[in-house]
Image (spheres, rainbow, N blue to C red):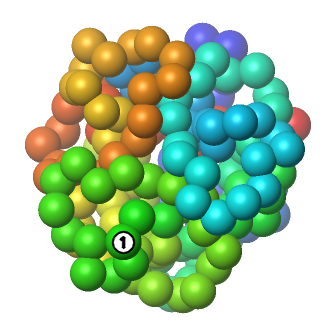
Amino acid sequence: MWYEVVAVETAAPDIADQFYYLVAQSSGLCADVRGGPSAMEDGIALQQWTCWGGDNQKWKLIPTGPETYEIVSKSSGKVLDVTGGPPAKADGIPIQQWSFLGGANQLWKLIPSGNALQVTAVNSGMCLDVRGGPTAVDNGIVLQQWSCWGGANQLWELIPAN
């Protein structure tokens, strides 16, 4: 592996002091704001993409309460957001970037699972998921929320970014 996975419980005191890549265990691809580092608008979809070091693939985890975080894009300063606001609780709802408003659809829990994490939306309790399941390993596949079931497409590695 080209990186070292960070365990949230060991990084927690200073986790907000640096940026990370969120790497899908199923594909080895990074959570990526579609459109690259210049994509600044609210509502731009998140996808998985080859990790190349762009600021649109770097995320800061800012604690918002006990075991909850806002996940902020280095390039835009916007957060991971479940489309549709706090009432959005169904399988298949896309994840986008949006200005931080403090809604439960913009807050996330990081739950250890083996050597990876389940990233779960506070509003729904659902997992950050690569659409299409564990065999969806291509660039450009969108991220969504889906009922947590433990598939590799719902497991994420937290990798320190330079």
Q: Nearer the viewer, residue 26 or 92?
A: 92
Which quarter of the figure has residue 124?
Answer: bottom left
- Residue 22, quarter of picture: top right
Amino acid type assigned to the residue bearing label 1 in the image: Gly
Residue situated in front as seen by the camera: 112 or 91: 91
The residue shown at (36%, 71%) is 84
Q: Residue 95: horizontal and vertical position, in percent? A: 44, 53
- Residue 57: x and y, percent? 70, 38
**Residue drawn at point x = 54 percent, y = 87 percent:** 102
Image vertical order of residue 102 relative to residue 70, above or below: below
Q: Mark 1 — residue? A: 84
Any part of residue 5 in sight: no
Instruction: Say if residue 73 shows up in the picture.
Output: yes
List x then y, in percent, for residue 73. 72, 55
* 43 w.r.t. 153: above or below: below
Disc 1, SS: loop
Q: Nearer the viewer, residue 77 or 19?
A: 77
109 left or right, relative to 74:
left
Left or right: where 120 falls relative to 101: left
Q: Nearer the viewer, residue 26 or 130?
A: 130
Quadrant of the frame with the C terminus: top right
Q: Residue at x 82, y 41 (%)?
A: 37
Q: Position of residue 107 (x, y in %)?
A: 46, 74
Identify whether 152 is placed above or below 144.
above
- Residue at image x 64%, y 43%? 33
Task: Determine crowd level at label 1: few under 14, some 14-19, many 20+ residues with C-alpha closer than 10 A.
Answer: few
Q: Quadrant of the N terminus?
A: top right
User: Horizontally, is 120 left or right of 4 in the view?
Assistant: left
